[in-house]
Amino acid sequence: MKSYHTDDVALTFLNDIPAIGPLLPCKEDALKVTRSYLRLIDKLAREKKDHQRCSLRFIKQKDGRFTLVVRGPGMAIETLSNLDELMLQRFKRGLKGNMFILTSFFNEPDGTLACLALAEGMGAVLYSPG
């Protein structure tokens, strides 16, 4: 499994679907963050059907990096911060089917990078049209 990471963010591909998320020091932290994502995204998904759909935006931070924001009617979730331009380009190139997994990553005790979507099946599968 080919993975890319910075100090804050990691990216891998599961069957050609990009999985992206924060890189956290341990599995427990990764579980907490991913559970939080799932609760908030579930709340967005339960909004009234006559409202507009959720949208994804990459907002440029003052330091030149990006934050992924999921917006719904009356609510916005900053899901991923400190995404550098190289990581953003790798992510966008991998979005062939307009689908990706928002999850978390953590360092195993032996120092290897682990993806929570693969290790525990935890993550939100999101569709981003166009």
Image: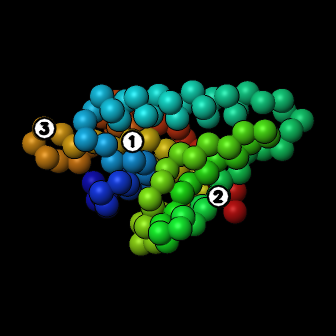
Precedes in sequence: disc 1 or disc 2: 2
* Residue hosting label 3: 109
Q: Nearer the viewer, residue 130 or 108?
A: 108
Q: Secondary structure at mark 2?
A: strand
Q: Secondary structure at mark 1?
A: loop
Q: Quadrant of residue 53?
A: top right
Give the image location of residue 83, x and y in percent: 45, 61
Q: CA distance from mark 1 to mark 2?
A: 19 Å
Number of the label disc, if any, that sits on residue 20: none
* Residue hosting label 1: 104
Residue 94, visible in the rendered structure = no
> Mark 2: few, some, or many residues within 10 Å (few <14, many ≥20)?
few
Residue 100, visible in the rendered structure = yes
Q: Of the residues shown, which amino acid type is indicated by label 2? A: Arg
Q: Nearer the viewer, residue 8 or 20?
A: 8
Q: Nearer the viewer, residue 54 or 19?
A: 54
Q: From the viewer's perspective, is residue 97 above or below residue 51?
A: below
Give the image location of residue 67, x and y in percent: 54, 57
Residue at 33 percent across and 32 percent down: it is 29
Give the image location of residue 111, x and y in percent: 13, 46
Give the image location of residue 59, x and y in percent: 61, 62
Is 3 situated left or right of 79 in this image?
Answer: left
Q: Of the residues shown, which amino acid type is indicated by label 3? A: Pro
In the picture, the quarter occupied by the N terminus is: bottom left
Precedes in sequence: disc 1 or disc 3: 1
Q: CA distance from mark 2 to mark 3?
A: 34 Å
Question: How many badges with numbers are in the image?
Answer: 3
Precedes in sequence: disc 2 or disc 3: 2
* Residue hosting label 2: 57
Q: Of the residues shown, which amino acid type is indicated by label 1? A: Ser
